[in-house]
Image (tube, rainbow, N blue to C red):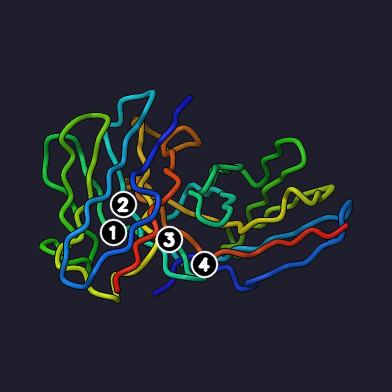
Amino acid sequence: GAVVSQHPSWVICKSGTSVKIECRSLDFQATTMFWYRQFPKQSLMLMATSNEGSKATYEQGVEKDKFLINHASLTLSTLTVTSAHPEDSSFYICSASIGGAPIGPDTQYFGPGTRLTVL
Amino acid sequence: DQQVKQNSPSLSVQEGRISILNCDYTNSMFDYFLWYKKYPAEGPTFLISISSIKDKNEDGRFTVFLNKSAKHLSLHIVPSQPGDSAVYFCAASAKGNTDKLIFGTGTRLQVFP
């Protein structure tokens, strides 16, 4: 159980275009979803936290207008990279949280990630 | 400001021996720590966790030790197996912000026969 999927798994786009990445919780309802970015040989950096039906909370330094997050339902969150540039090339990973406290092993389940390459 | 640090980018261990992966943190508000295993082009998978009220947690071949005074934790894998070869991330969360995970930079473990 607790499977999170991402689509697409990899995408190549031209500079200036927009790319949408989907994150779905397949067998549970996710009260909260998280978006991370990982550059090669670096740690996963939290970009934003989204709760269903409300605006996402972005981490410091993450441009809200560039990385649009929509959490339309308890099973789907989308990240849109607008006007993508080569420096946006990265591995984007989402996670979904069943919720509840305290945080524990059943709190966040990670998707397989999406490799974005901007030419 | 890297609040969670894994100073060894890589570790190579012979099959059957013990693997010890280390993690240091700077934020004294962290009260829950997790270890994740990650294969290339995949998301992290949860391995084991520990609360700050404990100093040890064991699950099969995996044991996590926490030294709060030193702000240090370690993951022991024994015996190591070739299938353990992956990148291991430690992560931490703080009281009042339990959903926000702060990850270390990862340690690539290679277990050779």
What's the mark number on residue B94?
Answer: none
Look at the numbered disc 2 and give the secondary structure of its residue: strand
**Residues at discs 2 and 1 both on one chain:** yes
Q: Residue at x 73, y 67 (%)?
A: B11
For mark 4, give the secondary structure. loop
Question: How many neighbours does mark 1 have within 10 angstroms: few (below 14), some (14-19), or many (20 or more)?
Answer: many
Q: Chain of mark 3?
A: A
What's the CA distance linking mark 4 and mark 3? Answer: 7 Å
Near mark 2 (Cα within 10 A), the count class, few <14, some 14-19 or many ≥20, is many
> Where is the C terminus of chain B found, in terms of image quarters?
bottom right
Name the residue beneath numbered marker 1.
Answer: A47
Amino acid type of the residue tagged 2 in the rendering: Trp
Mark-to-mark CA distance, 3 and 2:
10 Å
Rendered location of residue B72, percent (x, y): 61, 62
Screen quadrant of the N terminus of chain B: bottom left
Q: Quadrant of residue A119?
A: bottom left
A30 to the left or right of A58: right
Give the CA separation, mark 1 to mark 3: 9 Å
- Image mark for residue B105: 4
In the picture of the structure, the residue carrying the numbered disc 2 is A35
Write down the chain letter for disc 1.
Answer: A
Both marks 1 and 3 on one chain: yes
